[in-house]
Amino acid sequence: MKLKAWLILPGLLIFFSGNIYGQNQENENSDRPKREISWINPDFQAMDGLTHHVLKSEALGHEVGYVVWTPPTYIEKVKERFPVIYFLHGAGGNESADAAGFSEWVSKSINDGRIEPVICVFPNGGMSGYRNEVEAMIISEIIPLIDKEYRTIAQPNARALAGFSMGGAGSVYLSIMHAELFTAAGSMGGGLRNHEELTEKIRQSIPVWKDSDFGFILINGDEDRPDAFVEFAEILEQNSVDHRVVILPDTKHNLGLYYEKSVEQLIEYLGDKLGSR
């Protein structure tokens, strides 16, 4: 069985922004000051439907901000329920950093008829890689809260993940660790390499992905680790899990370039998965 052949490969490393995830964020021997994390960031570009909120997180042990965008039809059609895209920011970002930018692209895709209306949610992941306490905050607190406070379709086939850099890697990671909660994941500028910690979890997730028609869209620039998902994509291919690998020409690790060249493709892919429920 091909999967067994893969399982004996070296372990997986998730990385972002040129750093390898799984190692300490700050090298013990480094003289660089540790980056201070701001957990509540209410300032962002004004946009209709975009609101900032604060959660008193038990998982984190302190308050944390998150942003929600609702499309115009959320107000216009008060009995309608909506799928949700959870967008994860990159290293050095926060809940407000990408909220307006990504929401504007989603709004454009809705207006162009490329996807059905969706809600977008932007958690604050700090510098966590979306693991440990932040992972628990998103999975056990943010998602249930959004399903309670908003008219969502509270089902796995109506939730998708997306993100850039650390957030792209985080989207894939959360899809591996919690395959039963989502229907698709999109990564821009993230990556996944062999990692023993995830080997068994990937094996367990494969039948869940196949049964739910889960999909991955994995986007990297030709100057931004174009081989970042080679091994992972090979496993998806061998096990008939829907996926799309996109390599962008003349693209470095820059969110603006990823937006310009690929975000509409990413949004449409996620929209198709959310619309096939």
Image: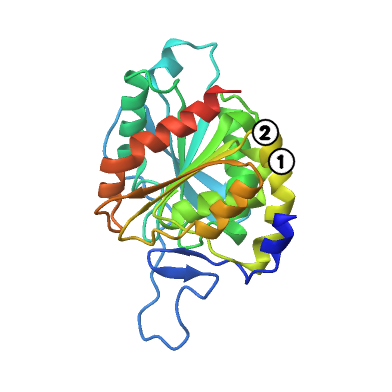
Q: Position of residue 28 (x, y in %)?
A: 47, 85
Residue at 45 percent of width and 77 percent of height: 26
Colouring of the image: rainbow
Question: For this rendering, which residue is in front, 115 or 231?
Answer: 231
- Mark 1 and mark 2 residues within 8 Å of each other at the beta carbon: yes
Q: Position of residue 134 (x, y in %)?
A: 56, 56
* Residue 60 visible (yes or no): no
Q: Secondary structure at mark 2?
A: helix
Q: Which quadrant is home to the N terminus?
A: bottom right
Residue at 58 percent of width and 47 percent of height: 138
Question: For this rendering, which residue is in front, 55 or 191?
Answer: 191
Which residue in the structure is indicated by mark 2? 212
Q: Position of residue 39 (x, y in %)?
A: 44, 55
User: How busy is the neighbourhood of tag 2: few (under 14 within 10 Å), some, or many (20 plus)?
Assistant: some
Horizontal side of 273 relative to 38 (left or right) equals right
* Residue 59 visible (yes or no): yes
Which residue in the structure is indicated by mark 1? 208
Tell me the kind of residue under disc 1: Val
- Which label sits on residue 79? none
Residue at 44 percent of width and 89 percent of height: 29
Q: Secondary structure at mark 1?
A: helix
Question: For this rendering, which residue is in front, 28 or 142?
Answer: 28
Rounded to the nearest angstrom, the CA distance separating label 1 from label 2 is 6 Å
Q: Position of residue 187 (x, y in %)?
A: 45, 48
Tell me the kind of residue under disc 2: Ser
Q: Is residue 194 above or below residue 98?
A: below
Q: Which quadrant is home to the C terminus?
A: top right
Question: For this rendering, which residue is in front, 110 or 67?
Answer: 110
